Structure formats: C-alpha cells, structure tokens
C-alpha cells in the first residue's frame, strides 16, 4: 500500500484501516524492524504535543529512520513571517515524509497539495487527528476483541475535540451505537450528526455522564480544548463539567475500557488510574505501533 499521505481519516477505506491495524499488531510483536533505513522524516509541530510528536519520532527511530523538525514554531522561520506554503516547499526538498500539526483547520490538506512528499496530519485545529484514530481503533480492537457492534460514549468537548471527529467517522464501517455526552456549549457539530444519519449510525445526545456509564463498552473521555476558545470566560464555564471518579465505575460493564487521547486535566480523577478499566496509558503506548504502520504503509513498505 502506497499513498500520498494521511490528511483525513476519510482517506482510508475499511480495508485500509484493517490492513493498518494488522500491520500495527505485527509491529507490536516485532517493533525493531529496520524498514526506514536511509529515510528521513520531518516532524513540523506548529502546536504543542507530547504523545503525537514523541511517538512518531519513536516510531521512526525504532524503524531505523532519522528525524528532523521543530517542536515549537517560534524556533522556525514562520516566526519571521515565512508562509506555510514556502515552509512545506522547502522541507519537502529535504525529506521522504512530513508529519505536521497545525492550529488551522485544513492546513494539512493544503500542505499535502504543496508538498512533493507525503504529508501525515498530526492534528489540524478542531478538524481531524487521523493517526490518533488509528491508535484508538487499535486499542478498541485489542481490548474488545472486535470493532463491531460496540456502544461508544464520547464525553466532554465534542465541539473542538478533533480526536472525536476522526474516530466517529472511522467507526462508520463497524456498526457502532454512539452516546454524545457534553454540556450544551460543546455539543458535537451538526456536520457529524449529519454524517451519522447518512451512514445509519444511531446516536443520542446527553448531558449526564451517569446515564451512559452502565451501558458503554468504550468510554471515550476528552479534555476541554482551552486553546480553541476565543473567550476565557466561556472556557471557565465548562472546564470542570465532568470528572470521572473511581467509585463511578461500580455497575459498569466488565468489558468497559476508558480511553482518553490525553493530556487529561480534571476530567479523569487520578484514582481511576488504578482501575483495570483505565486504558489510556496503554492506548498512548499503542501509538508507536499504529504510527509505525501508517508511516510504512504510506511509503509502500508494508
Ligand atoms: N493525543 C494527543 O494528540 O496528544 P498530544 O497533544 O500530547 O500529542
């Protein structure tokens, strides 16, 4: 499989997704295959990141490739006014693949049109985070034994949470039932509700997390995305809407797993970490295997 990159999860068919998950499982069993010997990957992060950047860089290093790039746009010439277009034209002269995070929705698509090498979207504003989705799918399949017929509750900032948007779209192939739990200010945008309707996916919008706890297979918690708010007063109103605590897991299904793209702030209490239902740190670890699989498939190596 070789492609021009991964900008939106909709770039992948069901077969593509299942192929990547199989390859990721191979990498988990055997993480040290040197498939990227002689290859150079750029990681261009115009927004902060811990997991995405470091797991991409771990993935490349473990595969024998090398990484250049920046983790802070202030250290790049974009701080002097260089355009994204010129930055991408330049960097695509140097490397075999570009991984980019950017605050503007659509920036990754634009970069992919400029670039002479494939571009992977590592998050564009509130839009998409497709490689997070691949590790989320990998984590769901690993913990549930299947992707089919699951009840998935998405909780928190469903308006700005790009990981929610990508995951919601990717699960279209696997007959999910969705519960969207958010305060009114952070409801899932209309276009994703239309997407569910168009694809025959049942969903219910709720405000209380307690209503979904006994029925969920996957509880997908999210952080309120402070950086997307233009008015700090609006952020203060919703920042602490949900806090999942350990005792709230009484009466939940045996197979329930709690996922979170991380970082978490107050939406999952630290005591939940002791529960076998808490899966978010393993989920982040799975990011290395999923990203190894995405990179190698885009470069036509698997
Ligand atoms: N999940 C995720 O995107 O985390 P980072 O912002 O730390 O990369």
Image (cartoon, grey):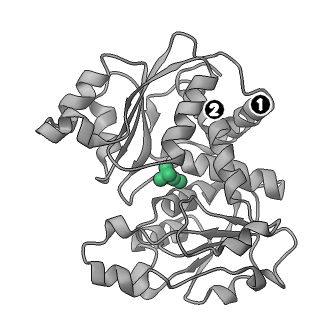
The relative height of residue 196 versus residue 60 in the rendered view (above or below) is below
The residue lying toward the viewer, choosing from 80 and 165, is 80
How far apart in space, not on screen, are marks 2 and 1 (Cα)? 9 Å
Q: Earlier in the sequence, mark 2 or mark 1?
A: 1
State whether label 1 is within 8 Å of ligand 1.
Answer: no
Q: Residue furthest top?
A: 38
Residue 279 vertical position relative to residue 98 in the rendered view, above or below = below
| Looking at the image, residue 208 lies above or below residue 17 | below
Determine if residue 160 is in view. Answer: yes
Q: Specify the label residue 26 is tagged with.
A: 1
Q: Residue at x 63, y 43 (%)?
A: 287
Q: Pick the quarter of the image with the N terminus.
A: top right
Among the 4 quarters of the image, the one containing residue 205: bottom right
* Label 2 sits on residue: 293
Marks 2 and 1 close (CB-CB < 8 Å): yes
Residue 259 location, quadrant: bottom right
- Badge 1: few (under 14), some or many (20 or more) residues near its Cα, within 10 Å? some
- Tally of marks: 2
Q: Residue at x 73, y 67 (%)?
A: 273
Judge left or right: residue 158 versus residue 27: left
For the point 28% across and 78% down, the residue is 232
Q: Quadrant of residue 179?
A: bottom right
Instruction: Tell me the element at label 1.
Output: helix
Quadrant of the frame with the C terminus: top right
């Amino acid at each position: 499989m070789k492609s021009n990159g991964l900008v939106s999860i909709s770039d992948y068919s069901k077969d593509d997704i299942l192929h990547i998950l199989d390859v990721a499982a191979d990498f988990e069993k055997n993480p040290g295959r040197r498939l990227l010997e002689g290859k150079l990957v750029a990681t261009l992060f115009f927004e902060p990141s811990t997991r995405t950047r470091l797991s991409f860089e771990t993935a490349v290093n473990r595969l024998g490739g090398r990484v250049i790039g920046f983790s802070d746009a202030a250290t790049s010439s974009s701080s002097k006014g260089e355009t994204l277009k010129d930055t991408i034209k330049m960097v695509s002269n140097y490397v075999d693949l570009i991984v980019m995070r950017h605050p503007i929705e659509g920036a990754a698509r634009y970069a992919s049109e400029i670039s002479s090498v494939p571009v992977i979207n590592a998050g564009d504003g509130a839009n998409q985070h497709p490689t997070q989705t691949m590790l989320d799918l990998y984590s769901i399949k690993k913990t549930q034994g299947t992707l089919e017929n699951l009840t998935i509750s998405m909780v928190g900032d469903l308006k700005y949470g790009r990981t929610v948007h990508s995951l919601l779209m990717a699960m279209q192939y696997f007959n999910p039932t969705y519960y969207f739990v958010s305060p009114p200010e952070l409801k899932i945008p209309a276009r994703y509700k239309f997407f569910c309707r168009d694809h025959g996916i049942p969903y219910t919008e709720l405000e209380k997390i307690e209503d979904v706890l006994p029925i969920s297979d996957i509880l997908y918690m999210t952080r309120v995305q402070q950086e997307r708010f233009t008015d700090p007063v609006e952020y203060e109103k919703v920042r602490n809407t949900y806090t999942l605590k350990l005792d709230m897991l009484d009466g939940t299904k045996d197979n329930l797993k709690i996922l979170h793209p991380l970082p978490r702030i107050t939406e999952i209490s630290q005591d939940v970490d002791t529960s076998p239902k808490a899966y978010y740190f393993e989920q982040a670890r799975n990011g290395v295997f999923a990203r190894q699989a995405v990179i190698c498939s885009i470069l036509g190596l698997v």
